[in-house]
Amino acid sequence: MDFTARYGRYALIAGASAGLGAALADGAAVRGLDLVLVARRKGVLEHTAAALHERHGVDVRTVVADLAEPDAVERIADATADIDVGLLVYNAAAEPQGPFLDTPVEDLLANIAVNCTTPTLLVHALGGSMVARGRGGIVLVSSSAALQGIKVFVAYGAAKAYELILGEGLWDELRGHGVDALSYVVGATATPELLSRTPQAASNNPAARQNLPPDTALDHLRTPQQVAATLFEDLAGGPRRYSHAADEARERANAGLTRAEVVTRIGEQTTALWS
Ligand SMILES: NC(=O)c1ccc[n+]([C@@H]2O[C@H](COP(=O)([O-])OP(=O)(O)OC[C@H]3O[C@@H](n4cnc5c(N)ncnc54)[C@H](OP(=O)(O)O)[C@@H]3O)[C@@H](O)[C@H]2O)c1
């Protein structure tokens, strides 16, 4: 597929300084797209931007913004007013972890802002001109945590479910206007973020995993580069795609179980890995 012909010249990756976001930016640049990269850490973001420019020769601009803040969308719109953003990939996430009732209210609100409010408003800000041009792409990076209620990540899973359903609805509304919308269900990925939270994933020692229940997310860990490649293989294949075949298979199998069974099973795994 010719990505610039299908989407336009620029891809904007929200949450692009490291991990999966940087791999997604690399995947867009490999396909000839110029880049707008958004994240909070200026130094890390500029380092990633310089490396991508050096590697692929594409134009890269950066926007330092906190996607939890109410002015984030306006800052991004101002920084991109002179260009057409053809592909929007919303990758950033807030991930409150731990018992719901012990989670500070400000973390719960940041979860809603980063995972629900800001992607909604960013799609609203950028989607209209995609429709006017008759081409574009919108990817909302969701999570396998969105597929059922999930203890330890109660608010995160709920917010990622919002993102998942938002993308599916957009797919149906926008596909008649030349715009590909897609919800991308991402499973366990060896990003710095995951490795910092999950000692068993970071460890090369199999003993670190021996007391885990069978078939946990860590049995299917993929690299950010693999997860990015799977997205670009089928970006036009909405409304929902999975980064991990195992998550898609589990979702199908879960249809035959009660919700209590599904939620209890994932709860046992998250308790073993993250409590
Ligand atoms: N890793 C996994 O196993 C996994 C599993 C399921 C789903 N996912 C989903 O995949 C996506 C990325 O995964 P990840 O969390 O592991 O981390 P990641 O790929 O490292 O991405 C996090 C990126 O988002 C940026 N970011 C985070 N909060 C931000 C904020 N408030 N404002 C602006 N930028 C922000 C970070 O940069 P700064 O810190 O510089 O701002 C970083 O560049 C998320 O949507 C996540 O829900 C990941």
Image (cartoon, rainbow, N blue to C red):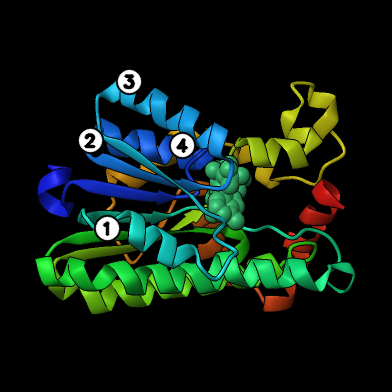
Give the CA separation, mark 1 to mark 2: 17 Å
Q: Which of the labelled discs sits on residue 55, or is there none? A: 3
- The residue under the point 31% across, 41% down is 35
Q: Amino acid at mark 3?
A: Arg
Give the CA separation, mark 3 to mark 2: 12 Å
Q: Is mark 4 within 8 Å of ligand 1?
A: yes
Q: Is residue 60 left or right of residue 92?
A: left
Where in the figure is residue 192, as x and y percent of width and height? 64, 35
* Residue that label 4 marks: 22
Q: Amino acid at mark 4?
A: Ala
Picture quarter with the N terminus: top left
- Which is nearer the N-term, disc 4 or disc 1? 4
* Residue that label 1 marks: 237
- Which is nearer the N-term, disc 3 or disc 4? 4
Q: Residues within 10 Å of mark 3 (few under 14, many from 20)?
A: few
- The residue under the point 56% across, 32% down is 43
Q: Amino acid at mark 1?
A: Gly
**Mark 3 or mark 2: which is in front?**
3
Q: Is residue 117 above or below residue 229?
A: below
**Mark 4 or mark 1: which is in front?**
4
